[in-house]
Image (cartoon, helix red, strand yellow):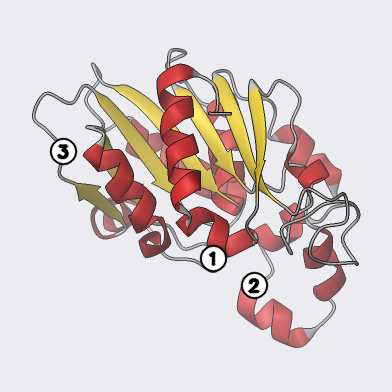
Amino acid sequence: MGLTRWAIAGCLLLSAPAHAEEAVILLHGIMNKSFVMSPLAKALTQEGYKVYNWGYPSTDGLIDQHAERLSRFVATIEPAKKVHYVGFSQGAIIIRYTLTHYPVKRDSRFVMIAPPNHGCELAEDFYQYGWFRGLYGDKSIKQLFAQQNTFLEKCGIPKIEFGIIAGGKGDGRGHLDRIPGDDDGTISVASAHLKGERDFIVLPHQHTPLVFASDTAAQVIAFLKEGKFKR
């Protein structure tokens, strides 16, 4: 699907104070729509950020293709603005790829929420089932396999400060036995880590509820402002 249609119909711009000098681009995860980022968008808007809740066809296309579209959208934002990024799950990987393969302002910050930086064990396990492929497609989901690390390595390390919010129980075992170590029921805490992270925090939520949680929003705001999470 062409950039123009998605740039217009897929990106929701929330109102912000006229003096706002910093923008935040939000990206949802796979099998999501932009509305899942709405609570976070509202919290950021109330803090004075100009928020772009960018929608994309999450199961239709590869992560690098979504990243190329995102880079073109970022180029349309006022050049003088500082642009931050917040991505949930697959959205975080799209941003990660964008920030390592396209020009970016280095004084910006990036928060990943539940990112499968080293893949998702469940995606690889369930891909054998037709119902799973019917829901998630056969494109970007394969780039997120835990054992298929070639693409994830190509995503690189973001050129700007980034912090990571993971979900988990904090007990070393997590929500699902088939995922090693602590996890949010979908992504392991170990997979969320990424070399170069400026800060990392685990919040007591499962995967999708994590993006709706008020403490997640508070931590996102803290990192965008200070470059660290609140303890």
At label 2, counting other C-alpha atoms closer than 10 Å, the crowd grade (few under 14, some 14-19, many 20 or more) is some
Q: Quadrant of the C terminus?
A: top right
Residue visible at 75% across and 41% down?
152
Given the image, on which type of amino acid does mark 3 rest?
A: Ala
Query: Of callouts 3 and 2, which one flags the residue occurring earlier in the amino acid sequence?
Result: 3
Given the image, on which type of amino acid does mark 2 rest?
A: Gly
Task: Tell me whether the residue at label 2 lies in contact with that at label 1, contact meaning CB atoms closer than 8 angstroms.
Answer: yes
Q: Which residue is mark 3?
A: 16
Task: Count every numbered label the image shows and give the total.
Answer: 3
Query: Of callouts 1 and 3, which one flags the residue occurring earlier in the amino acid sequence?
Result: 3
Task: Tell me whether the residue at label 3 lies in contact with that at label 2, contact meaning CB atoms closer than 8 angstroms.
Answer: no
Residue sitting farthest toward the left: 18
Q: Which residue is mark 1?
A: 60
Residue 200 seen in render: yes
Give how far across and how far down residue 182 sits, in percent.
83, 51
Query: Of callouts 2 and 1, which one flags the residue occurring earlier in the amino acid sequence?
Result: 1
At label 1, counting other C-alpha atoms closer than 10 Å, the crowd grade (few under 14, some 14-19, many 20 or more) is some
Rendered image: mark on residue 137: 2
